[in-house]
Every structure is written in C-alpha cells, then in structure tokens.
Image: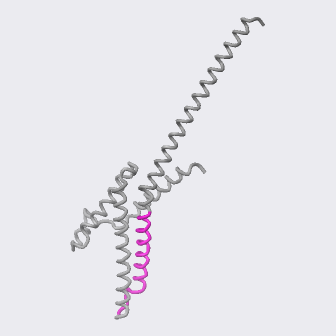
C-alpha cells in the first residue's frame, strides 16, 4: 500500500468516526430531552397530587364515610322505629335522628373543606374536570345560601323538575376524583 492509499484510508476513517460521533451525540441529546420531559411530567403530577387531588380526595373520603354511616343509621332507624310508639321509642328515635343530622353536618363541612381546596388549587386541576368541579361548587354554594330558609317543599319537587334541591353528597363527583387521583398515582409510579 502506498502513501496515497494510506491517506485515503485515514480520511475515510476520519469521516466515519466523525459521523459516528455525531450520531452518538444526537442520540444523547434526544435521550436528555426525553428524560427532561418525563421529569417535568412527574414533577407536575406530584404537585397536582400534593396541591389538589390528594387533599381534595381526603375531604371527599370524610364526606363518603359520613354519608355511608348516615345511610346505615337511616336504614336501621326504619327497621327499628317505624311503627313503634311510646315515650322510650320516641326518645331513642330522636337520638338516632340527631346522630344522622350530625353525620349530615359532617358531610356539609367536608364539602365546604373540599370547596376551599378546589378554590385554592384551581390552577392544578385538569381542564376536563372543570365542568364537574363547577357543578360540585355550585351545589356547595347553593347549600350554604338555601339552607335554613324554610323554602317550600314544592319548589324543589314540581312535576316538571325544573329546580332540584342542592346535592349534599355527589357520589359521581367523588368517584371521578378518586379515579383521577388513582390514575395520576399510577402514572407517577411508572410501569409495573
């Protein structure tokens, strides 16, 4: 091999090394970009869980537990006291009704806590949740405004159903928030 062949071989190898170096550098840049994107997404999910969906779900779980207990006492009240008469039955029934009212008040308090969390963390909510959140907040605000005003029963129960009483417990909303929180936690934990 003469010196011209050696030069051609060296130049060819140099070009090949340069191309290989450029390809490696390009791959590393792409990998860094993907990792940065995943890190930003993980940070955002963590902040959503910490600032919005986690605290909101806690308040809604308090409401759920109170609603479940209130419903159980309601069923037992019907089983035990419907049709009973007498002073003892009346007093015991009144105690159960008072307890059910206390659980109802816990639901209202938990809903108010949830509404405050939503108002403080509005920017962390997913856009597709805004309509459902707005409905929930509307019911909470209506409950606060309308409670204790001696509004006629017929107002909320006309045959056309144009005006419903505000919802005190909305299982649809609770389920949606629970599903969203769970999905965010699963995404954050990565593939299993």
Check the image and report above or below for 100 versus 136. Answer: below
Specify the segment rendered in magenta: 58-85
Check the image and report above or below for 105 versus 5. Answer: below
**How far across and how far down the image is residue 142, in percent?**
27, 64
**How far across and how far down the image is residue 144, in percent?**
27, 67
Residue drawn at x 31%, y 63% is: 140
Secondary structure, magenta segment, majority class: helix
Residue 84 part of the magenta-drawn span: yes
- The colouring scheme, among rainbow, by chain, secondary structure or one colour, is one colour
Check the image and report above or below for 37 versus 136. Answer: above
Say which of 15 and 180 sits in front: 15
Say which of 116 and 4 sits in front: 4
Which residue is most to the right?
1
**How far across and how far down the image is residue 110, in percent?**
37, 67
Residue drawn at x 36%, y 77% is: 102
- Left or right: 96, with 153 as reference point: right
Say which of 115 and 167 sits in front: 115
**How far across and how far down the image is residue 62, in percent?**
42, 68
In the rendered view of the protein, which quadrant contains the N terminus?
A: top right
Q: How many marks?
A: 0
Residue 88 part of the magenta-drawn span: no
Residue drawn at x 55%, y 36% is: 32
Check the image and report above or below for 34 versus 183. Answer: above
Where residue 70 sits, quadrant-wise, is bottom left
């Amino acid at each position: 091999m003469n010196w011209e062949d050696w030069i051609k071989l060296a130049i060819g190898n140099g070009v090949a090394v340069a191309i290989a170096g450029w390809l490696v550098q390009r791959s590393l840049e792409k990998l860094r970009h993907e990792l940065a994107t995943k890190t930003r997404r993980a940070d955002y999910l963590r902040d959503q869980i910490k600032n919005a969906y986690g605290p909101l779900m806690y308040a809604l779980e308090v409401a759920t537990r109170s609603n479940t207990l209130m419903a159980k006492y309601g069923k037992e009240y019907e089983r035990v006291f419907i049709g009973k008469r007498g002073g003892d039955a009346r007093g015991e029934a009144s105690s159960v009704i008072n307890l059910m009212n206390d659980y109802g008040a816990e639901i209202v308090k938990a809903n108010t806590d949830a509404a405050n969390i939503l108002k403080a963390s509005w920017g962390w909510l997913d856009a597709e949740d805004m309509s459902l959140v707005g409905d929930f907040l509307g019911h909470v605000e209506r409950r606060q405004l309308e409670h204790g005003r001696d509004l006629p029963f017929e107002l909320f129960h006309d045959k056309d159903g144009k005006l419903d009483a505000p919802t005190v417990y909305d299982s649809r909303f609770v389920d949606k928030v629970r599903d969203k929180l769970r999905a965010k936690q699963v995404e954050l934990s990565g593939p299993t």
